[in-house]
């Protein structure tokens, strides 16, 4: 979830993957950890290479997520950031 707004009363939410988008424009980002997803994909490739049928492999949901907060953007659009939120984020961009 990436939120960006020029009007502090409006919010646009989109699904996005790379944290780099949050570094450039978003106020906050919550999404799956891409490195962990690639590691899990490697496990699938290994199982298929060893002879497993892809249709027999379970579908997995992401289990690790990233929460990134861009204070620069928050300040630019006039949003105050609660301390409780700052304690929960994994990365703060200033």
Image: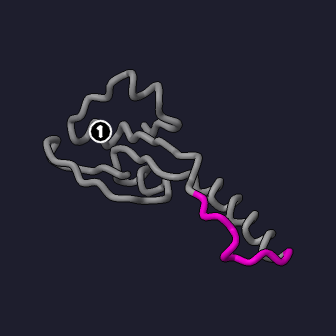
As rendered, which of 58 and 80 lies closer to the eye? 58
Q: Which residue is mark 1?
A: 74
Tell me where residue 25 appears, x and y as whole percent.
35, 53
Q: Is residue 10 left or right of residue 69?
A: left
The C terminus, quarter of image: top left
Q: Is residue 55 above or below residue 5?
A: below
As rendered, which of 8 and 56 lies closer to the eye? 56
Tell me where residue 13 appears, x and y as whole percent.
29, 54
Q: Is residue 59 above or below residue 56?
A: above
As rendered, which of 90 and 40 lies closer to the eye? 40
Q: Is residue 59 left or right of residue 16?
A: right
Which residue is drawn at the image coordinates 30% and 49% (left, top)? 3
Secondary structure of the residue carrying tag 1 is helix
Which residue is drawn at the image coordinates 17% and 41% (left, top)? 8
Tell me where residue 20 appears, x and y as whole percent.
48, 55
Give the farthest residue toward the front.
Answer: 56
Give the farthest residue toward the top.
Answer: 83
Membership of 2 in magenta stretch: no
Q: Is disc 1 surrounded by few (<14), some (14 to 19) or many (20+) residues within 10 Å?
A: many
């Amino acid at each position: 979830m990436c939120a960006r707004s020029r009007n502090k009363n409006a919010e646009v939410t989109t699904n996005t993957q790379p944290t780099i988008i949050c570094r450039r424009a978003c106020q906050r980002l919550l999404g799956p950890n891409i490195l962990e997803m690639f590691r899990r994909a490697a496990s699938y490739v290994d199982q298929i290479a060893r002879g497993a049928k892809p249709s027999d492999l379970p579908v997995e949901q992401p289990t690790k997520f990233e929460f990134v907060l861009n204070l620069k953007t928050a300040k630019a659009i006039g949003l105050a950031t609660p301390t409780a939120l700052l304690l929960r984020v994994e990365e703060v961009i200033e």
